[in-house]
Image: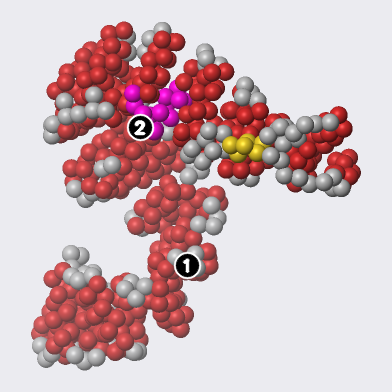
């Protein structure tokens, strides 16, 4: 390319260090060098080639040539500016800043140099220099209000509040009065200075000039409320309510005042009025509802969140987020069928959000709605095939239908997709243990339970089920007893766990201990389990109370247990293995 030839020809030129002086701020500024006609021609040629290199993204050669220009002409402001731009591309703002300071020393009336320098000063937090640069831009364009706004903000940041106010005064004169931007800037200053009266007076001035603009009433009320002037805030908002009673932000502001006054019924009524408006942004509504969640399981918080979520499903019926939140709050309030309906409406509006499918399928699995879980889970996996949890949930649904080959397939996929999720791995291997037991694959069942407990030694269901299945086979009874005991420590008063432990003790011929635990199971059981009733009879037989044993076996039969072995126990009045 052309610039390469020119660059190589320049390497024979002598190197030198230009003379420099310093500005009042301590910046080194290059001094002019007397240029010959040949020097000027060479500078123009090199600069042109450097620009050609830059626009073709050959930044390295471009930088070398711009530097060469500066060796010949240290005060070449264009080369300084272009080289600074290359430094900025590399986020080397400090180096760029020095070059730009040299450029404006040569051409102090170049607006673009100052604008780029302002950007560098912002990046390097050089506040004092930033003030100077903005003042120079104001000097160049005195009617540009943007520069004055920026200067006022910088002075505020530097805690030069009176100077910042003076700049805002200039803006008021230029704009012919207060506007929202000037008002907001001055409000910050007055509040920093503790001048609440001046802050409220200026907002009142805007209300007088714009009596139907509710936003100024809201601003004034916020000022009053944040400074513990609740009565004045309430009076201001009530005046605004007469102007626009349907304004949702007005009702939220009233709610804030009532909350601070501990008038919680009035607070909630105002929030409801705000939520009833379709003009209230749903993001704001969702944020408000989410604020209740840390207060769960307080029933009042749950009820309030539920009612508000219902309101947004009415005011935003076509937004999937409204129905998803309503579903979540219905679930929290244990209204599971209604929660399913809400989730389905959310998916019908926009079926591209995995988290909604996840909630729906979890609910279906927990309600033993296996067919629905398989259908909805399949839809979710068609959209998000790499979701390990969804594979697990669909696997559980298939296990509920006793389709164990598919259940095992989905669960294995889940373990492969989430090798680092210990909670999921423990749950999945536990379910795999159950599935393998059902198909009488005891080695794989035991292996799966061992893996489950390796990821979570406190998985109570793995401990209980593994222990029970070992006891049914009469294998490793000491290990089974330890696991069952630990499961009961983790989740005391759970009837099925207590029954497991009782049965293992029975298998170990520790009949007195077994009686204690089976009685606990019967006490805590709310379902009149025929298994526990039959086990109680088995234990009583070996404790020598045959009449109690037979009575218990008969009770199990009366409650629905039908088996030839149970009939033999009753007829022969003895325990049958």
Residue 547 position in % (x across, y down)? 10, 85
Q: Mark 1 — residue?
A: 420
Main SS of the magenta part reads helix
- Check residue 122 in the rendering and tell me which mark sits there, or answer none: none
Element type where label 2 sits in the image: loop
At a point 13% along the width and 88% down the height, the residue shown is 512
- Picture coordinates of residue 82 (x, y %)? 70, 35
Q: Is residue 318 located in the magenta-colored stretch of the structure? A: no
Give the quadrant of the N terminus.
Answer: top right
Span of residues in magenta: 149-162
Q: Give the vertical position of 213 relative to 275 (above or below).
A: above
- Whether residue 247 is visible, yes or no, is yes
The residue to which callout 2 is attached is: 159
Task: Name the side, left or right, on which 96 lies relative to 301.
Answer: right
Q: Please name whichever residue, 423 or 134, is drawn nearer the observer in this view of the structure.
A: 134
Q: Nearer the viewer, residue 342 or 288?
A: 288
């Amino acid at each position: 390319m052309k610039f390469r030839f020119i660059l190589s020809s320049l390497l024979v030129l002598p190197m030198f260090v230009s003379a420099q002086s310093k500005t009042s701020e301590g910046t080194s500024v290059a001094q002019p060098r007397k240029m010959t006609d040949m020097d000027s021609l060479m500078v123009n040629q090199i600069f042109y080639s450097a620009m050609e290199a830059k626009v073709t993204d050959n930044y390295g050669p471009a930088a070398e040539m711009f530097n060469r220009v500066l060796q010949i002409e240290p005060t070449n402001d264009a080369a300084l500016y272009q080289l600074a731009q290359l430094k900025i591309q590399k986020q080397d703002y400090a180096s760029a800043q020095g070059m730009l300071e040299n450029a404006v020393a040569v051409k102090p009336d170049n607006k673009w140099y100052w604008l780029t320098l302002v950007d560098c000063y912002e990046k390097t937090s050089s506040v004092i220099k930033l003030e100077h640069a903005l003042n120079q831009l104001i000097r160049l364009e005195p009617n540009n209000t943007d520069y004055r706004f920026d200067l006022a903000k910088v002075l505020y940041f530097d805690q030069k509040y009176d100077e910042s106010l003076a700049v805002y005064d200039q803006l008021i004169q230029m704009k012919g009065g207060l506007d929202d931007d000037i008002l907001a800037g001055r409000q910050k200053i007055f509040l920093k200075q503790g001048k609440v009266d001046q802050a409220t007076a200026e907002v009142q001035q805007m209300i007088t000039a714009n009596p139907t603009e509710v936003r100024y009433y809201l601003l004034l009320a916020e000022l009053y409320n944040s400074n513990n002037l609740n009565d004045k805030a309430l009076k201001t908002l009530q005046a605004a309510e007469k102007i626009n009673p349907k304004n949702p932000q007005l009702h939220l502001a009233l709610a804030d005042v009532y909350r601070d006054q501990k008038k919680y019924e009035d607070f909630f009524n105002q929030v409801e009025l705000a939520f009833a408006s379709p003009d209230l942004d749903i993001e704001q509504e969702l944020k408000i509802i989410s604020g209740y969640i840390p207060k769960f399981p307080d029933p009042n918080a749950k009820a309030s969140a539920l009612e508000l979520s219902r309101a947004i499903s009415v005011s935003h019926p076509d937004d999937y987020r409204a129905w998803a939140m309503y579903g979540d709050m219905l679930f929290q309030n244990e209204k599971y069928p209604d929660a399913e309906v809400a989730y389905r409406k959310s998916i019908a509006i926009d079926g591209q959000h995995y988290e909604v499918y996840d909630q729906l399928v979890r609910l279906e699995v927990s309600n033993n709605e296996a067919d629905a879980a398989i259908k909805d889970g399949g839809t979710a996996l068609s959209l998000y095939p790499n979701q390990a949890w969804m594979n697990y949930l669909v696997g559980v649904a298939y296990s509920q239908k006793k389709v164990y080959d598919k259940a095992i397939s989905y669960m294995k996929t889940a373990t492969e997709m989430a090798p680092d999720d210990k909670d999921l791995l423990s749950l999945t291997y536990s379910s795999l243990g159950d599935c393998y037991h059902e198909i009488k694959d005891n080695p794989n069942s035991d292996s799966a339970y061992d893996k489950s407990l390796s990821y979570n030694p406190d998985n109570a269901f793995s401990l209980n089920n593994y222990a029970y299945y070992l006891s049914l086979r009469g294998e490793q009874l000491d290990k089974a007893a330890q696991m069952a005991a630990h499961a009961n420590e983790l989740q005391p008063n759970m009837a099925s766990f207590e029954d497991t432990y009782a049965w293992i003790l029975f298998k170990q011929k520790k009949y007195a201990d077994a009686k204690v635990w089976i009685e606990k199971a019967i006490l805590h059981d709310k379902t009149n389990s025929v298994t526990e009733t039959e086990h109680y009879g088995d234990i009583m037989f070996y404790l020598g109370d045959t009449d109690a044993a037979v009575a218990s076996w008969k009770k199990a039969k009366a409650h629905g247990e039908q088996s030839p072995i149970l009939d033999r126990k009753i007829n022969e009045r003895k325990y049958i293995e």
